[in-house]
Image (spheres, helix red, strand yellow):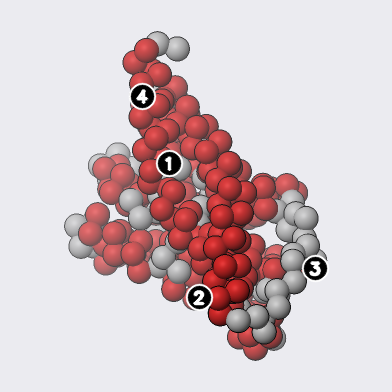
Amino acid sequence: MTYESFLQLNTIFISLLIESLPFVLIGVVISGIIQMFVTEEMMAKAIPKNKFLSVIWAAFLGALFPACECGIVPITRRLMAKGVPLHAAIPFMLTGPVINPVVLFSTYVAFGNDWGMMLNRGGLAFLVALLVGLILSIQFKDSQVKNDHHAHVHHYANFKTKISGTIKHTIDEFFSVGKFLIIGAFVAAAMQTFVKTSILLDIGSGEYSSTFVMMGLAYVLSLCSEADAFIASSFRSTFSEGSIVAFLVFGPMFDIKNTLMMLGQFKARFVLYLFLYVAIFVFIGSILLI
């Protein structure tokens, strides 16, 4: 490794951490609040009993959480600990980083106030989350969370005790999730340093291969969903609109950082299935619908 390569690796690694840490912090704080203030009874009343309706409910709920792909993972796990079923929690996790107002507005601005690109991104993300949730409701009947045991929270505790518990849980969750973020950021930085973008551009000259390349690029770059639209807009003269939408949808749902974070929270077999479902539906959707 040359000195210039080391500097580039270091710069990208630090920038990824700086970009991601605030949203991870937001995620673990919300996770702590859910743990201490949201009861299982509240969640049971809020979630529709019908599986199809619960998937739709969860996908829309993701729009209310301005969390990136890293911050949404601990929130999702905590919701599942409170009784949210897998088939509802995962659509929430998939749509949260894509269709929340901050991301949609940044997409609108990045593409020159283009409503079409913003709606295509949000629409495809919602459709993918919906299809994945329905498949999961059939395939998996039990929780796929690792070490699926959680401390019981006495919800009759006073407010001061709950605040103290929220802070403690937030700190524990931050260090639990943080190590996967650091590893993922380093791997992503290494990929960006040593894999030339020009190679990907050469491979992605075909109609279908361009979509694969853009999805692969989104996975490798591991950009924060609040900023990825500005990067994607620079590819408009090179790639098709469908492949750019695939980049904007697949990246927030799966990248190097959050894959490692998911593997720390969920069973590896489940993460593999989830990756395949998301990749297949994003690819097909970006070609057929865009």
Q: Spatial distance from mark 3 to mark 2, Cα to Cα? A: 22 Å
Label at residue 61: 2
Query: Picture coordinates of residue 1 (x, y %)?
Result: 45, 12
Q: Spatial distance from mark 4 to mark 2, Cα to Cα? A: 38 Å
Q: Nearer the viewer, residue 216 or 172?
A: 172
Q: Nearer the viewer, mark 3 or mark 4?
A: 4
142 sits to left or right of 112? right
Q: Nearer the viewer, residue 42 or 258?
A: 42
Label at residue 93: none
Query: Picture coordinates of residue 23 (x, y %)?
Result: 43, 55
Q: Spatial distance from mark 1 to mark 4, Cα to Cα? A: 14 Å
Q: Earlier in the sequence, mark 1 or mark 2?
A: 1
Q: Nearer the viewer, residue 222 or 134?
A: 222
Q: Is mark 2 on a helix, strand or loop?
A: helix
Q: Which amino acid does label 3 sit on?
A: Lys
- Residue, x 62% and y 70% (percent of image)? 35
Q: Spatial distance from mark 1 to mark 3, Cα to Cα? A: 36 Å
Q: What element carries label 1?
A: helix
Label at residue 17: 1
Q: Which of marks 1 and 4 is nearer the N terminus?
A: 4
180 sits to left or right of 267? left
Q: Which amino acid does label 4 sit on?
A: Gln
Q: Spatial distance from mark 3 to mark 4, Cα to Cα? A: 45 Å
Residue 214, relative to residue 281: is it above or below?
Answer: above
Residue carrying label 3: 141
Q: Is mark 3 on a helix, strand or loop?
A: loop
